Image (cartoon, helix red, strand yellow):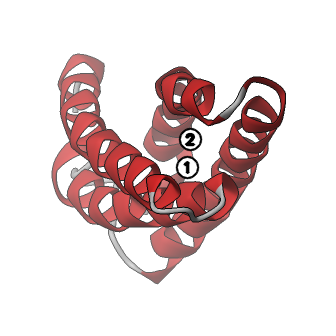
């Protein structure tokens, strides 16, 4: 499977995931939930969608699988990126305020998305 095709699908699916993640985070924090918990809720909603779509579409191939091992790898990767994202959102909120956290979330998630692509391509979905 070509890097170009995988990259294109990963970006498309990632965009949908990100919109869901961001909307949940902004909506819940707007309703008064602390930004760290709102961020975790957003990331969970995006992750549920992304694991399945990326396994079935983006990284599907003869040398990949979508099963228990891949889910365990995905969860480990997700826990690490969610911790990083949540700490960053909390720090930005503490220093600059909630509106800046809302604005900074896309940049934080873009960086984590690049790391996630590499880990997914070379580790998470490998059979």
Cα–Cα gap, marks 1 and 2 = 5 Å
Disc 1, SS: helix
Residue found at x 35% / y 68%: 48
The reply, left or right, for residue 97 in relation to residue 57 is right
User: Residue 46 location, x and y as percent?
Assistant: 36, 57
- The N terminus, quarter of image: top left
User: Residue 64 location, x and y as percent?
Assistant: 34, 57
Of residue 57 and residue 34, the one placed in the foreground of this image is 34
**Is the Cβ of the residue at disc 1 closer than 8 Å to that at disc 2?**
yes
The reply, left or right, for residue 4 in relation to residue 125 is left
User: Residue 67 location, x and y as percent?
Assistant: 38, 78
Residue found at x 27% / y 51%: 54
Residue found at x 58% / y 65%: 33
- The C terminus, quarter of image: bottom left
User: Label 1: few (<14), some or many (≥20) within 10 Å?
Assistant: some
Of residue 29 and residue 52, the one placed in the foreground of this image is 29
Of residue 26 and residue 67, the one placed in the foreground of this image is 26
Of residue 65 and residue 40, the one placed in the foreground of this image is 40
User: Residue 108 location, x and y as percent?
Assistant: 59, 27
Residue found at x 65% / y 47%: 81
> Residue beneath label 2, please?
119
Q: Is residue 88 visible?
A: yes
User: Label 2: few (<14), some or many (≥20) within 10 Å?
Assistant: some
Q: Is residue 48 above or below residue 77?
A: below
Disc 2, SS: helix
Q: Is residue 126 visible?
A: no
> Residue beneath label 1, please?
123
Instruction: Please identify the quarter of the rendering in which residue 65 is found.
Output: bottom left
Instruction: Name the mark on residue 39.
Output: none
């Amino acid at each position: 499977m070509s890097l170009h095709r995988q990259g294109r699908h990963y970006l498309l699916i990632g965009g949908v995931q990100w919109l869901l993640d961001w909307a949940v985070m902004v909506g819940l924090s707007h309703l008064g939930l602390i930004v760290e918990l709102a961020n975790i809720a957003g990331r969970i909603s995006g992750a549920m969608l992304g694991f399945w779509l990326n396994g079935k579409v983006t990284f599907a191939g003869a040398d990949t699988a979508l099963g228990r091992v891949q889910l365990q790898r995905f969860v480990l990767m997700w826990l690490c990126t969610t911790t990083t994202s949540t700490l960053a959102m909390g720090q930005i909120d503490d220093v600059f305020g909630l509106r800046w956290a809302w604005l900074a979330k896309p940049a934080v998630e873009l960086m984590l998305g690049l790391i996630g692509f590499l880990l997914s391509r070379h580790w998470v979905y490998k059979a």
